[in-house]
Image (tube, rainbow, N blue to C red):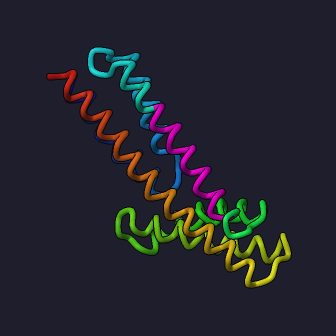
Amino acid sequence: MIWLVLSIVFVVVLVGMAMTAITLPGIWMMAACSTLLALWVPEYVGWWTVGALFAIAATSEFVDFIASALGVKRMGGSRSGAVGSVIGTLVGAIMGTFMIPIPIVGSIAGGVLGAGLGAFFAERSIAIRSIKDSVRSGSGAAAGRLVSMVIKIMLAGAASAVLVTMVIYNAF
């Protein structure tokens, strides 16, 4: 049974890390998996582990929200720029994954570039800002997104380590 549980955990951890790298909720998927495992095989995954994964997931969302918002706002961007940054991040991260096929690097580069371009175009077309102001907002969005993505990937690594470590510890 332990080998089945370990196999599931390793697949979920790998998929969760990849999802996090392209700005999808990979940490939340790991937390949900830990909940299902705690219900199915409580001798391998305890509720403290589930709580730790949900705490890490909530922390990652808080960091993501704060870093992105601060990046745009710090450079004088508008709400349109913030929304454009979020849309640009998702599109850029997915495109970057395929255009730069180096694991995680392509997603981060695409997400950062997408955030900057999304904020820039939203500021120019929706908020009707000058090129100078749009560039400032776009650069703030890109910087905020870079910080956010790096921290989220680190938190996904922490969530992965907690889940794998606790399953192995409880199994042996």
Q: What percent of the width, then of the height, locates residue 6? A: 24, 32
Q: Using residue 65 as the reference point, say whether residue 93 is left or right of it.
A: left
Quadrant where the image shows the N terminus: top left
Magenta-span inclusion, residue 33: no
Q: Nearer the viewer, residue 152 or 24?
A: 152
Task: Give the residues drawn in magenta, as a range.
Answer: 54-72
Residue furthest out toward the left: 172
Q: What percent of the width, then of the height, locates residue 153? A: 41, 53
Q: What percent of the width, then of the height, locates residue 127? A: 84, 70
Say if 149 sits above or below 31 in the image: below
Identify the residue at horizontal 38%, vertical 70% (top origin).
Answer: 101
Q: Using residue 53 as the reference point, say whether residue 10 is left or right of it.
A: left
- On the question of residue 165 being in view, the answer is yes
Quadrant where the image shows the C terminus: top left
Magenta-span inclusion, residue 66: yes
Q: Tell me the chief SS of the magenta region.
A: helix
Q: Nearer the viewer, residue 127 or 28?
A: 127
Identify the residue at horizontal 42%, vertical 30% (top origin).
Answer: 33
Identify the residue at horizontal 62%, vertical 67% (top origin).
Answer: 141
Identify the residue at horizontal 40%, vertical 28% (top origin).
Answer: 34
Quadrant of the rendered structure where residue 139 is? bottom right
